[in-house]
Amino acid sequence: MRAATIRDGEVLVAEHDDPTPGPGELLVRVRAAGLNGADLLQRRGHYPAPAGSPADIPGLELAGEVVGAGRDVTRFGPGARVMGIVGGGGQAELLVVHERQVTPVPDVLDWHQAGGFSEVFTTAHDALVTQAGLRPGERLLVHGAAGGVGTAAVQIGRALGAHVTATARNVDLHPRIAELGADVVAEPGALPEDERFDVVLELVGGPDVTADVRRLRTGGRIVVIGVGAGIKAEVNLVALMGVRGRIMASTLRARPLEEKAAAARAVERELLPLVERGALTVPIAVSYPLEEVSAAYDRFAAGGKLGKIVLDLG
């Protein structure tokens, strides 16, 4: 099979042996695979794949058709359209993944949308709902709202009945973020100093956290799931104590199968019905064929986009 392959800090297309599914695993013919920030970090040697995932084939999310299965597979048969998150290896023509990590692809999603759905919507749902417990009527602040996770979080917040404020550097994208469900869209640092939030989704990193603490309402929660702008922050603990606030953080990639399966079932139960009704969508910034994977990574690194960059694997 052909796959995006990391070699000496670059990403190129190379031939690999076809994978073989083990017990409970599906062999999937990948049709589309989204790019994520973790892929860029892995290309630079800063985010190695977890044990059990290909060390040199990136890709945390994919969509495709089941073409084979190992023993003890009980749910998905040949030809089933599936999508899901993996520890790596998604940007390849073939992939093996445990059937409990994937969900069906809703009929309303094309391959590009399905290929860019699972990582960002699972991440956003896990952070906002499972961890922060976002409730209807609460006020949500999403930093970095133009990216994949940001656009997912804005839509989930709207669907849950929260008041959504979003920040994004590219002002040209503000109207499109508002169309996704943000009640207020602003440049970073342009929010009124006295505005307070119940939940802050931190996708930018350390430099934001000091201000995030100041912006918490009583009982407010900060969830850190991105650190692209820095890994360190100075926190006023007295201010955090004063509002009985909490700071949480997580990643999905290295979680064990049981936790990934639980996250997949939560998405299937709570988000896929919203996708079917058109309440959630997957904005696609641009797609590239596998042969142009290097250009796709360069476009991702350039920033200034709204939504997902997706590899088309045919």
Image: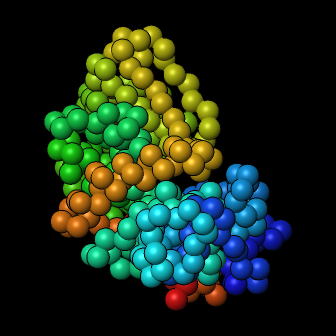
- From the viewer's perspective, is 259 left or right of 297? left
> Is 227 on the left-hand or right-hand side of 168?
right
Depth check: give the residue in front, 166 or 57: 57
What residue lies at 30% left-to-right and 52% top-to-bottom? 269
Whether 286 is drawn above or below 21: the answer is: below
To which quarter of the image does residue 39 belong?
bottom right
Looking at the picture, does residue 266 appear above or below residue 197?
below
* x and y, in percent, of residue 87 in the image: 62, 57
Query: Can the viewer see residue 81 in this picture?
Result: yes
Q: Nearer the viewer, residue 90 or 239?
A: 90
Spot occupied by residue 47 in the image (x, y as percentages of width and height): 70, 52
Residue 11 appears anywhere in the view: no
Q: What colouring method underlies this structural image? A: rainbow
Q: How many marks?
A: 0
Looking at this view, name the residue that lies furthest to the front. Answer: 72
Please give the name of the residue rendered at 31% of the width and 20% of the height, measured from the top-left corner. 219
Residue drawn at (34%, 15%), measured in percent from left and top? 243
Left or right? Give the position of 243 relative to 78: left
Residue at screen point 48% across, 30% down:
248
Using the image as rendered, state which of residue 8 and residue 77 is in the foreground: 77
Figure quadrant of the N terminus: bottom right
**Residue 185, percent across and down?**
27, 51
Query: Residue 255: x, y in percent?
Result: 59, 44
Q: Nearer the viewer, residue 95 or 171?
A: 95
Looking at this view, name the residue that lies furthest to the right: 8
